Image (cartoon, rainbow, N blue to C red):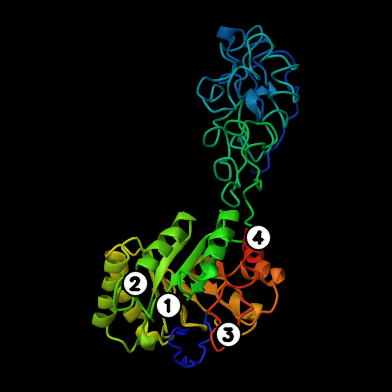
């Protein structure tokens, strides 16, 4: 878009974007109140192993018989009420150190051996507090004789640490370690951050400000930028298809005024669609830096869209950054191969009359919008609908009602409306 001296732009073809296991339950009352020497199946174990020993009152003690407190759940440590073994069943198996075997709920000395609290199927024995299969970290406790060893730390391992995570904050595990309450910590939950949503990027505008600093357009862009300070505004300045042959005090003052309003100012360089040598382009970048040391970046006009020239523009961009011109923009004015993404900071992928089709812009949806901008001209009125749709794919949008032969010799008449739409 070299319109200061107006050299016809070479039309380039657009290169399209390739862009628990089942638990058996034993009847609750074999051998009633004692622990006769007969071997009893189920969770009470044999009399000689689980509290039925005559030496500890296992003949008729209420705790030595087969209590169901050693079944699944937190009642794994079945202690006896009046007789039986000291801790209800064999210390090796009834007193498991898993989270299901603490004497707090199942086997307290006061009630563990009776069939009411510890041995019944209400609290400790069957599928009450922790015995059944749960999905928490506490999980399903394996069955056995009077509280056989638990599997893992308190039963089946849970799915993940508190549940499978969905999204950045998907796991909403509650409780510590998924105790035997219905899997509050083990269930898979979708947290508030689990699903991703598509939101519009913070949008701004890149303005080809190819007028002289004394033109009213410079005051107008400053006023609009100050009225909409949250919208990033980039102004391309262009004394003479580049920095010109000498430093201009008018541009020095004008650039300072733009920057005071929060506008980022970058200098114009024509690259001849990749035909200009690296050395000549670096010399022009040096001139910009020498004449206007507060300049913030370089605009590479006439950018090639040939894949073979990607390295050319990478080199130019890196050089500009190396001398302190930290923001680089390329202008192929049309679609480019995705190999160009990242060669410069931002590329203007549309420069033509009227707004582009949304399908053309959405072809770049896989990349951050900050990589792209558009500068349609001959747009007679502000098009807020286009702006809101386009900002999903491109971060920088400039529309102007000006037209050929030079659409960049004025500031669009609805510039303030454009900034309002970009907020």
- Rounded to the nearest angstrom, the CA distance separating label 1 from label 2 is 12 Å
Q: Is residue 190 above or below residue 313?
A: above
- Is 204 left, or right, of 195 in this rendering? left
Q: Which residue is mark 1?
A: 340
Which of marks 4 and 3 precedes in the sequence? 3
Which residue is depicted at the point 55% across and 89% down? Answer: 405
In percent of width and height, residue 77 lies at 60, 21
Q: Which residue is mark 3?
A: 352
Q: Which residue is mark 4?
A: 420
Q: Is residue 73 above or below residue 50?
A: below
- Rounded to the nearest angstrom, the CA distance separating label 3 from label 1 is 20 Å
- Is 285 left, or right, of 364 in this rendering? left
Give the camera-side residue of 308 and 52. 308
Label disc, if present, on residue 317 of the rendered structure: 2
Q: CB under 8 Å between callouts 3 and 2? A: no
Give the camera-side residue of 298 and 360. 298
Which of marks 2 and 3 precedes in the sequence? 2
Q: Is residue 327 visible?
A: no
Which residue is depicted at the point 62% across and 48% down? Answer: 193
Quadrant (top left, top right, bottom left, bottom right) of the C terminus: bottom right
Label disc, if present, on residue 318 of the rendered structure: none
């Amino acid at each position: 878009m070299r319109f200061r001296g107006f050299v016809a732009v070479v039309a380039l073809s657009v290169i399209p974007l390739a862009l628990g296991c089942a638990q058996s339950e034993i009847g609750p009352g074999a051998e009633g109140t004692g622990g006769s020497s007969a071997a009893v199946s189920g969770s009470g174990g044999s009399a000689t192993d689980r509290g039925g020993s005559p030496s500890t009152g296992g003949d008729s003690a209420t705790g030595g018989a087969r209590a169901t407190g050693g079944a699944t759940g937190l009642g794994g440590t079945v202690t006896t009420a009046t007789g039986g073994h000291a801790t209800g069943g064999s210390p090796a198996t009834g007193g498991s150190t898993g989270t299901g075997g603490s004497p707090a709920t199942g086997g307290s000395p006061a009630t563990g051996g009776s069939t009411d609290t510890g041995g019944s199927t209400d609290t400790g024995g069957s599928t009450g507090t922790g015995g059944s299969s749960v999905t928490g970290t506490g999980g399903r406790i394996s069955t056995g004789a009077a509280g056989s060893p638990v599997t893992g730390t308190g039963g089946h391992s849970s799915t993940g640490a508190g549940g499978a995570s969905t999204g950045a904050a998907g796991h909403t595990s509650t409780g510590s370690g998924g105790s035997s309450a219905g899997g509050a910590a083990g269930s898979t939950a979708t947290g508030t951050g689990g699903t991703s949503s598509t939101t519009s990027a913070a949008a701004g505008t890149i303005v080809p400000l190819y007028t002289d600093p004394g033109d009213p357009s410079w005051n107008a862009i400053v006023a609009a930028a100050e009225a909409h300070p949250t919208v990033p505004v980039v102004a391309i300045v262009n004394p003479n298809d580049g920095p010109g042959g000498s430093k201009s005090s008018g541009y020095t003052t004008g650039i300072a005024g733009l920057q005071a309003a929060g506008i980022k100012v970058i200098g114009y360089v024509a690259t001849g669609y990749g035909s200009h040598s690296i050395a000549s382009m670096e010399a022009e970048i040096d001139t910009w830096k020498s004449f206007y040391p507060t300049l913030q970046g370089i605009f590479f006009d006439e950018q090639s869209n040939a894949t073979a020239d990607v390295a050319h523009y990478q080199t130019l961009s890196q050089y500009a950054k190396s001398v302190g011109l930290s923001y680089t923009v390329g202008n192929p004015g049309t679609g480019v191969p995705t190999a160009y993404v990242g060669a410069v900071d931002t590329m203007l992928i549309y420069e033509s009359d009227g707004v582009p089709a949304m399908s053309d812009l959405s072809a770049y949806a896989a990349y951050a919008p900050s990589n792209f901008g558009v500068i349609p001209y001959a747009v007679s009125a502000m098009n807020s609908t286009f702006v809101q749709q386009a900002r999903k794919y491109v971060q920088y949008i400039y529309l102007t009602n000006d037209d050929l032969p030079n659409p960049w010799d004025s500031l669009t008449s609805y510039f303030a409306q454009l900034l309002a739409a970009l907020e």
